[in-house]
Image (cartoon, rainbow, N blue to C red):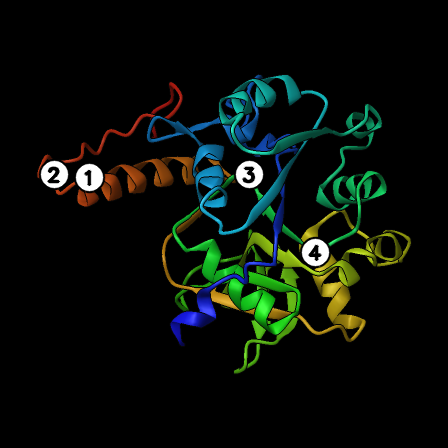
Amino acid sequence: MKEKDFIIEDNCIIDCILLCGGYAKRLFPLTKNKPKVLLTIADRPCIEYVIESITNIDNLGKIFALVNINNFKEVQQYLDKYYMYNIEIIVEPEIEIREQWGPIKALSYFLSKYPVNDYLVIGGDNVFDFDLNKFLAKAIKINVTTIAVKEFPPNDDLRRFGTVKISNDFVVLDFLEKINSFYRHVSIACYYIKKNELNLIVDFINSESFDDNLGLFFQWLCFQGIKLKAYVFDTFWFDIGTYQDLVKANKHIREFTKRKKNLKAHFSNNTFVDGFSPK
């Protein structure tokens, strides 16, 4: 791959939708009174790692943070520290509490209020170490909705993730969302979605296949014969879906940070996260 393939063209402005809703019931009691995206990993809120990656994007435009009505005050208070960036908080309406909206209905609500353009859509609970500029430059160059995926070893149990079947030339052939059968590539809730596909969200909501899940939306797009591409990365990634994930991420980031600083101090096996210790 040539270096120029990783450069975003100057006339291409990248707007980002940051998904910060959801109630994270699998993480109770940690998330009972705290938004999932504000749980701490190595003494920093989870969302801080994501924003750090986003704000390093060349030609970054606006950031739209989608939050539910229960946690928007906490998220807004935290995001105030990033006043120098163009971040707008979109609060999902009260009906979301009764219906337990997922990302599809949240995106549909956003697109009913704002222009349907090409967007980087990314989960606020992602912790990763790949360069979004390279991901975006590739997606923009091929001009196709593109999904970031990570390949896992054959023996790993991936049932609780959305997994992707891809061809040798990285075309997405199928999605499987959190079932006993799975593929080897995991979708990490980082997508460059073209406006043509975003325009189909309402059709998906009205279809018999609808479930409020991004993976199933992409599976539905595949069934419609729409071409999607995968961007495979090999650096670290953590999805903060369970307490065990939180502990693993905390430990890895602490060790990674120490290695980067070339410190020789031994990292304790007794990892503590938000007042809880692993059993």
Q: Nearer the viewer, mark 2 or mark 4?
A: 4
Q: Earlier in the sequence, mark 2 or mark 1?
A: 1
Return the residue found at the far left.
Answer: 264
Label 2 and label 4: CA atoms lie apart by 42 Å
Residue 157 appears left or right of 195: left
On the image, numbered disc 3 is attached to which residue?
Answer: 124
* Disc 2: CA contacts within 10 A as few (<14), some (14-19) or many (>=20): few
Q: Position of residue 224 (x, y in %)?
A: 81, 71
All told, the count of numbered labels is 4
Residue 154 appears left or right of 10: left
State the residue at coordinates (91%, 53%): 206
Return the residue found at the far bottom.
Answer: 168
| Along the line of sight, the residue nearer the viewer: 260 or 237 | 260
Residue 103 appears left or right of 224: left
In this rendering, does residue 32 appear at all? no
Q: Earlier in the sequence, mark 1 or mark 3?
A: 3
Q: Position of residue 71 (x, y in %)?
A: 64, 21
Disc 2, disc 1: CB below 8 Å? yes
On the image, numbered disc 1 is attached to which residue?
Answer: 258
Q: Earlier in the sequence, mark 3 or mark 2?
A: 3
Q: Earlier in the sequence, mark 2 or mark 4?
A: 4
Q: Position of residue 219 (x, y in %)?
A: 71, 64
Q: Nearer the viewer, mark 3 or mark 4?
A: 4
State the residue at coordinates (30%, 42%): 252
State the residue at coordinates (25%, 40%): 257
Kind of residue sitting beneath label 2: Leu
Label 3 and label 2: CA atoms lie apart by 29 Å
Q: Secondary structure at mark 2?
A: loop
On the image, numbered disc 4 is attached to which residue?
Answer: 118
